[in-house]
Every structure is written in C-alpha cells, then in structure tokens.
Image (cartoon, rainbow, N blue to C red):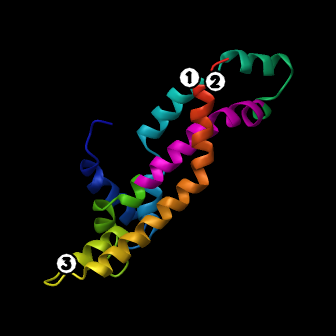
Amino acid sequence: MMIPPQLGVIPLFMLIAELQWVNQLQAVILPGLVSAFGVFFMRQFLIQTLPDELIEAARVDGASTARTFWTIVVPIARPGMAVLGLLTFMTAWNDFFWPIVALSSQNPTVQVALRQLGGGYVHDQSVIMAGTLLGTLPVLLVFSLLGRQIVGGIMRGAVKG
C-alpha cells in the first residue's frame, strides 16, 4: 500500500493491451474494483465487529458454511461493505491519471473531459461549473444509496449495551 500507484501503470497497461481493452471502459473500471486497501479494510472491520461466538453458535445449531455466511456475516459486514463501496467508487470516479493512459481523447471520463473544458485560451466558467455539477451528481447518488447503511453502521458502533 505504500508503493505509489504510478509505478504499476506500465505493467497494468501491458495487461490491458494484451486483453485488447485499450480505449474501452472496462480498462478503467475493472482494475479499480479490488485493492489491497479494500482487503485490509474489510479484514479489520470483520475482526472488530464479528464475534467468533456467533460463528461457533451457527455451527452448533447446524448451519452450513453458506448459510452462516449469508445470514450472519453479510448482515454484520454490510456497513463496512457500504463504506468500502463508496470509497472505491470515489477513488475510481476521481481518478485522472489512469483514464488518460488507458482511454483515447475521443472517449474520456468525466474528470478528463472537465480538464479539457478548462483548457484553451478562454475559460467559460459557466460550462466548467455545469460540468462539475454533472460530475458531482453520481457521487451524491451513490452516497444516497449507501448512506443508510453507512449511518446505520456508525449508529450500531456508537450504541453499547
């Protein structure tokens, strides 16, 4: 996690070129889905919130591994998954460097297009602000979808008893 992501751009681009995904959106979407931070975050979250006694009680009651996972682990992990989903989306949505490398200028992401709006000799502030508003709306939409889970997780951790 301490290695800058820019060091992995060349091997990642070689992989994307081998898969023939250059100038396609999956080249930007798929590499951002899994990260070392996400694995570490979910591990720490589950260690702190999931007591071993719940898993043992499910085993004693005769629940299968799949049933234990879906009925015990997933509901407890849902707030952490919501936070991780929001952070992953924000990271991928605000990424500027990798979309410039992986996509062409005819198929830009929102942030690259906003930069192109600000380029040139004359800056039309109203167009830039309208583009910024349109770039902010998906983030607000994702937060509104995941916000209840995030706030519920915060409230569950704040109330002891």
The residue located at (45%, 47%) in the rendering is: 87
Crowd band around label 2 with a 10 angstrom C-alpha radius: few (<14), some (14–19), many (20+)? some
Q: Is residue 100 above or below residue 94?
A: below
| Percent coordinates x, y for residue 13 in the rendering | 32, 60
Check residue 55 for magenta coloring.
Answer: no
| Percent coordinates x, y for residue 139 in the rendering | 47, 60
| Percent coordinates x, y for residue 145 in the rendering | 60, 55
Check residue 84 for magenta coloring.
Answer: yes
Crowd band around label 3 with a 10 angstrom C-alpha radius: few (<14), some (14–19), many (20+)? few
| Percent coordinates x, y for residue 138 in the rendering | 49, 64
- Amino acid type at circle 3 is Gly
- Amino acid type at circle 2 is Leu
- Left or right: 97, with 76 as reference point: left
The residue located at (86%, 19%) in the rendering is: 61
* Alpha carbons under labels 2 and 1: distance apart: 6 Å
Q: Along the polypeptide, which appears first: circle 2 or circle 3?
A: 2
The residue located at (43%, 43%) in the rendering is: 35
Q: Is residue 105 visible?
A: no
**What residue would you read off at disc 3?**
119
Residue stretch rendered in magenta on the structure: 68-90
Q: Secondary structure at mark 3?
A: loop
**What residue would you read off at disc 1?**
47
Q: Which mark is residue 50?
A: 2
The quadrant of the picture occupied by the N terminus is top left
The residue located at (62%, 24%) in the rendering is: 159
Q: Nearer the viewer, residue 143 or 44?
A: 143
Q: Secondary structure at mark 1?
A: helix
* Alpha carbons under labels 1 and 3: distance apart: 48 Å
Between marks 1 and 3 in the image, the one whose residue lies nearer the viewer:
3
> Magenta span: helix, strand or loop, mainly?
helix
